[in-house]
Image (tube, grey):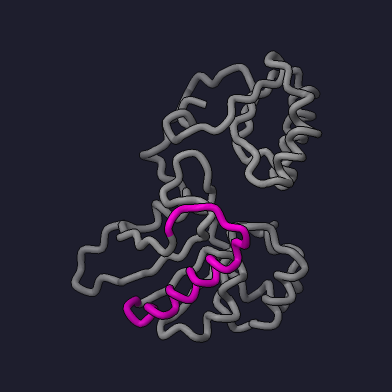
């Protein structure tokens, strides 16, 4: 997005730390954040492995708030974690929720009812009580059509793109493929210990290289052809 007038806004976009911006193979939220604006990337943490991830995420939020006076808007993409701290910002704050809403998240949203929040779908916030849900605007994820290649002749298979974890339900994709009689190609990989255990128990035994094929992680170029 290019702003050509003299009153150009300075917007701070604060994503999570678990995947880099812009992602090559993983990072759904980061993939959505990248096209929102032309920006300067500020490295909040050095790359590495974390024993307790929350400490680094807290520092990421804190450093964003410390510099909030330099921006016209601070836009958090970290779920509900930053909502209690948003009042400390010296500039207006917006929180976009990208992930499923848990009972704990509902508790937090109702506790901070004045916090400006957007969601990415109506089904995402369907479980939130009406009074709080009515204050949440739904703005669907955008798509950079210039970066996506349209294929008028799709392959004769079903495709699944996502992490190999229970939250993404690749086992449901396999079930649907078997019912349809079409082969299924799975693209993606498990992320953490829970997802590795799920993949080994629920998915790997069903991969036969013929009706269910797993090609692992794919980059943006491979996603276009996939």
Residue 49 x/y as whole percent: 54, 53
Nearest the viewer among 200 and 156 is 200
Q: How many marks?
A: 0
Residue 53 placement, left or right of 166:
left
User: In the displayed structure, would residue 195 be above or below residue 175?
Assistant: below
- Identify the image quadrant of the N terminus: bottom left
The image quarter in which residue 40 lies: bottom left
In magenta segment, residue 163: no
Q: Residue at x 63, y 32 (%)?
A: 160
What is the magenta range? 46-71
Residue 81 placement, left or right of 166:
left
Residue 103 x/y as whole percent: 77, 68
In magenta segment, residue 63: yes
Q: Residue at x 41, y 64 (%)?
A: 44
Nearest the viewer among 148 and 226 is 226
Nearest the viewer among 161 and 22 is 22
The image quarter in which residue 54 lies: bottom right
Furthest toward the top, the residue is 210
Q: Residue at x 73, y 22 (%)?
A: 207
Q: Residue at x 41, y 80 (%)?
A: 66
Residue 188 x/y as whole percent: 60, 35
User: In the displayed structure, would residue 179 be above or below residue 95?
Assistant: above
Residue 185 placement, left or right of 203:
left
Residue 59 x/y as whole percent: 50, 71
> Mostly what secondary structure, the magenta segment?
helix
């Amino acid at each position: 997005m290019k702003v050509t007038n003299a009153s150009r806004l300075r917007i701070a976009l604060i994503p999570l730390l678990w995947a880099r911006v812009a992602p090559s193979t993983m990072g759904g939220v980061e993939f959505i954040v990248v096209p929102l604006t032309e920006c300067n990337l500020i490295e909040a943490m050095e790359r590495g492995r974390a024993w307790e991830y929350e400490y680094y995420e807290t520092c990421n939020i804190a450093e964003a708030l410390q510099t909030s006076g330099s921006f016209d808007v601070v836009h958090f993409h970290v779920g509900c974690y930053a909502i209690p701290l948003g009042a400390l910002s010296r500039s207006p704050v917006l929180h976009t929720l990208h992930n499923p809403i848990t009972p704990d998240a509902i508790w937090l949203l109702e506790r901070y009812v004045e916090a400006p929040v957007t969601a990415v779908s109506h089904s995402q916030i369907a479980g939130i009580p009406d009074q709080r849900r009515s204050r949440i605007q739904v703005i669907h994820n955008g798509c950079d059509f210039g970066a996506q290649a349209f294929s008028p002749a799709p392959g004769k298979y079903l495709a699944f793109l996502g992490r190999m974890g229970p939250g993404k339900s690749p086992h449901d994709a396999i079930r649907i493929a078997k019912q349809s009689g079409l082969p299924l190609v799975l693209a993606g990989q498990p992320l953490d210990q829970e997802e590795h255990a799920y993949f080994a128990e629920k998915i790997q035994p069903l991969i036969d290289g013929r009706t269910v094929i797993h090609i692992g992680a794919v980059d943006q170029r491979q996603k276009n052809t996939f």
